[in-house]
Image (cartoon, rainbow, N blue to C red):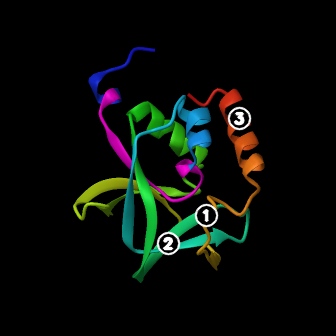
Amino acid sequence: MTTTPADRRKQWLFTYGTLRDPEVQQILFGGHRPSEMARLSGWLLCASDEDGYLFIRPEPTTTVIGAVIELDATMLAIADQWEEVPRYQREKVQVQNADGTSREAWAYTKRDGHGAIYSGTETSLLDRQTVLAAAELFKRQDHS
C-alpha cells in the first residue's frame, strides 16, 4: 500500500474513553500516540446502557475532560472501525487545550445515546483486560 502526503497529514482526535488507553493505542496503532490534555465544552460523558462503553452527547452546560491524540489518515480509519462508525458518529468539535488555546479535533459522538452520566476515571465500565482482549481480536481481524 502506497502512502500519500494526505495519508500522513496530522489529524487530531479528542479521546475520552478506550482510545485514551496507551495499551489500546499500542495495539490499534502500533504505538502510543502523542497526546495533550483537553476539554470539550457543551458535551456530557455517559456510560452506555447497552455495552458499558463511554460516549458523549450534547449538553450545553457540561464539559468533558479528555485528551487530543495525533493520528494520520490511516490511523483515523482504524479508529473509525474500532468505534464502529456509524454506531458512533465522527464529527468535528472545538476543544480547549491545557494552555487555553483551542483546536479543531474529531470526536466520536452518540447524540441519541442512552446511558447514565459518567464521572469515573476508567475508560469504560468494562474490565480493562476485556477491552485489551477486544482490541487484540480487532487487530487480528486485519483492521489496518
Assess whether residue 13 is covered by the magenta stretch.
Answer: yes
Q: Which residue is mark 1?
A: 54
Label 1 secondary element: strand
Q: Can residue 23 be seen from the camera position used here? A: yes
Label 1 near label 3: C-beta < 8 Å? Answer: no
Assess whether residue 95 is covered by the magenta stretch.
Answer: no
Q: Nearer the viewer, mark 2 or mark 1?
A: 1
Residue 41: x %, y % from top left? 36, 73
Label 3 secondary element: helix
Find residue 136 and name its label: 3
Find residue 57 and name its label: 2
Amino acid of disc 2 = Arg
Question: Label 3 crowding class (10 Å Cα cut-off): few <14, some 14-19, many 20+?
Answer: some
Label 2 secondary element: strand
Residue positioned 71% across, 63% down in the render:
125
Judge whether 61 appears above or below 40 on screen: below
Residue 59: x %, y % from top left? 44, 80
Residue 7: x %, y % from top left? 35, 28
Q: Which residues are magenta?
A: 8-20
Tell me where residue 22 sits by quadrant: top right
